[in-house]
Amino acid sequence: MNLRDLEYLVAVDEERHFHRAAARCFVSQPTLSGQLKKLEQELGVLLIERTNRQVSMTEAGIAVVEHARKALAETAIIKDVANNYKDPMTGDIRVGIIPTIAPYLLPIIMPHLHNHFKNLKLWLYEYQTQACLEKLNKAELDFLILALPIEKHDFTELDLFREPFRLAVNREQLLAKKKHLNLGDITNQKLLLLEEGHCLRGHILDVCLLAGVQEQTEFQATSLETLRHMVGEGMGMTLMPELAVPKKTSKADDVRYIEFSDPKPNRRIGMLYRKNNYREDTFNNIAELIKSVLPVNVFF
């Protein structure tokens, strides 16, 4: 048994097709099929059911392939550990980032990360908070960028910045004429919010509780951009994180973004990674660079 055979087995399990699995592993189909038959002979058990119509895993195959995945993952970690001792800012890093941060923060930080850490490959995965946490716990991701705090977790936290909220309101609304707002200015208003699953929804609901604001329950958006368009159409108002506010606006724009007076409502953005991770120096270096390139309109 060798690692290559385990790669073939995992590929067949995920592709459920010998030709696609062989192409994925950059070998011929006969080579892949032959090696898997040898593996079955070595183990003395049938792993794959082969018919003209479909490829499926036997009960034994399902059990074995899960251990194969773990073995391959551990092998990758061994290689990564060795590389990290040579240079902590080299190798592959899998980053989870939530949808209300990713489109607005990544264009700011990625050019700097690429220029400063040329031997580091950052693989970016966008998931909602709960999925990020589950994948971090399973070591499918190396660190997360998301809104804090997170309740009941056993990860290490690194603070990055606090991101103020602005009121996004249609230009025809009376509030659009204000240069600054207090929370009392939006008391008894209704806000458009994101759907369940977005942590930003919870943060805005906290602001709503402080300000005596209610949710506009007739509609829940799947993204900040959907909320922006709804405000532009005059369907309501919402709170917009600072990094999602356009750098340049004009009087012709349908949406106005009104700043709050101090203390500004805000959300706390940070990094999470598994405790005692061998790449702790890597994560700290990345965090310090991110903080150094952030615009002045976010703070900590």
Image (cartoon, rainbow, N blue to C red):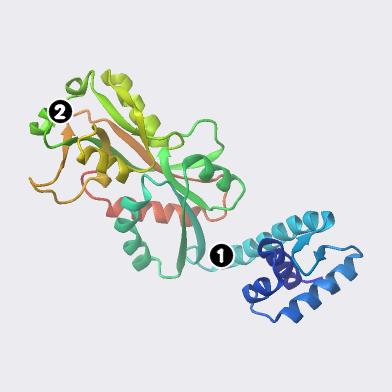
Q: Residue at x 27, y 51 (%)?
A: 294
Q: Secondary structure at mark 2?
A: strand
The quarter of the picture where residue 190 lies is: top left
Q: Secondary structure at mark 1?
A: helix
Q: How many marks?
A: 2
Q: Position of residue 21 (x, y in %)?
A: 67, 71
Give the residue pinned by disc 1. 85
Give the position of the C terminus as an image quadrant: top left
The mark closer to the camera, 1 or 2, is 2
The circle drawn on residue 181 is 2
Q: Residue at x 65, y 74 (%)?
A: 25
- Report, in whole angstroms, how far the alpha carbon at label 1 lies from the one at label 2: 52 Å
Decide which of tag 1 and tag 2 comes sooner along the chain.
1
Around disc 1, counting alpha carbons within 10 Å, would you say few (fewer than 14), some (14 to 19), or many (20 or more)? few
The relative height of residue 221 versus residue 286 in the rendered view (above or below) is above
On screen, residue 87 versus residue 80, left or right, reads left
Query: Disc 1 marks which amino acid?
Result: Tyr
Q: Nearer the viewer, residue 299 or 41?
A: 41
Q: Position of residue 236 (x, y in %)?
A: 24, 31
Query: Disc 2 marks which amino acid?
Result: Leu
Give the position of the N terminus as an image quadrant: bottom right
The relative height of residue 171 versus residue 114 in the rendered view (above or below) is above
